[in-house]
Image: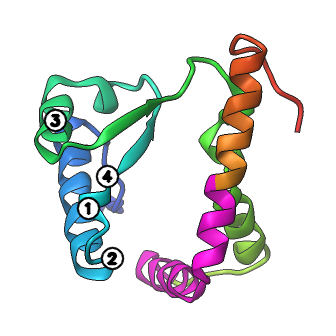
Amino acid sequence: MEIARSNTCTINANRYCETLRKLRRAIQIRRRGRLSGGIVLLHDNTRPHTAAATQELLDQFEWEIFDHPPYSPGLAHSDFHLSLKLKEFLGGKRFGSDEELENAVTTWLNELAAEEYDMGILKLVDRYNECLNVGGDYVEK
């Protein structure tokens, strides 16, 4: 009997660092000059984010970390601007393979206007400020 293999993998510090390197290359290619302006990442306290290897790589890249307050549902990544829009885009669709899903999401992301990204970041800043004003407690939407 053959066991079906999954394309999923565990995200550890090595895998996360690989993703950060790919992100850096993509920014260098698509957003020339943006790396010199500084990159800020929103990080929670998961092991891949807090691992020594990750911290060393981010120090090398000179990227700033914008800490995510622990257990703050008001700033949950799943609550972020693009996640809701992506959920809406994917709603009711079926894909024949992981590759088909990946292609659809990649196309969708590439077609979004820059303003969509900017608006999402501004919303995140507002929500983060609200969260800080109440000492990290839950913030209603």
User: Tags 1 and 4 in contact by the CB under 8 Å rule?
Assistant: yes
The kind of secondary structure element at disc 3 is helix
Q: Who comes first in sequence, dot 2 or dot 4?
A: 2
Residue at mark 4: 38
Instruction: Mark 3: give few (<14), some (14-19) or many (20+) Cα within 10 Å.
Output: few
Residue at mark 3: 59
Q: Which kind of residue does numbered mark 2 sit on? A: Arg
**Residue 93: percent from left, percent from top:** 72, 80
Q: Who comes first in sequence, dot 3 or dot 2?
A: 2
User: Tags 2 and 1 in contact by the CB under 8 Å rule?
Assistant: yes
| Residue 1 shows in this picture | no
In the depicted view, which residue is nearer to us: 41 or 122? 122
Q: State yes or no: residue 112 in magenta.
A: yes
Residue for point 61% across, 83% down: 113
Residue for point 26% across, 55% down: 19
User: Tags 3 and 2 in contact by the CB under 8 Å rule?
Assistant: no
Please state which of the two labelled residues, at mark 3 or mark 4, is closer to the viewer.
4
- Residue that sits furthest to the right in the current view: 140
- Residue that sits furthest to the front in the current view: 37
> For the magenta stretch, what is the residue range?
97-121
Instruction: Mark 2: give few (<14), some (14-19) or many (20+) Cα within 10 Å.
Output: few
Q: Which kind of residue does numbered mark 4 sit on? A: Gly
Q: Is residue 29 left or right of residue 93?
A: left
Residue at mark 1: 35
In the depicted view, which residue is nearer to us: 132 or 141? 132
Q: Main secondary structure of the magenta part?
A: helix
Q: Who comes first in sequence, dot 3 or dot 1?
A: 1
Residue 31 image label? 2
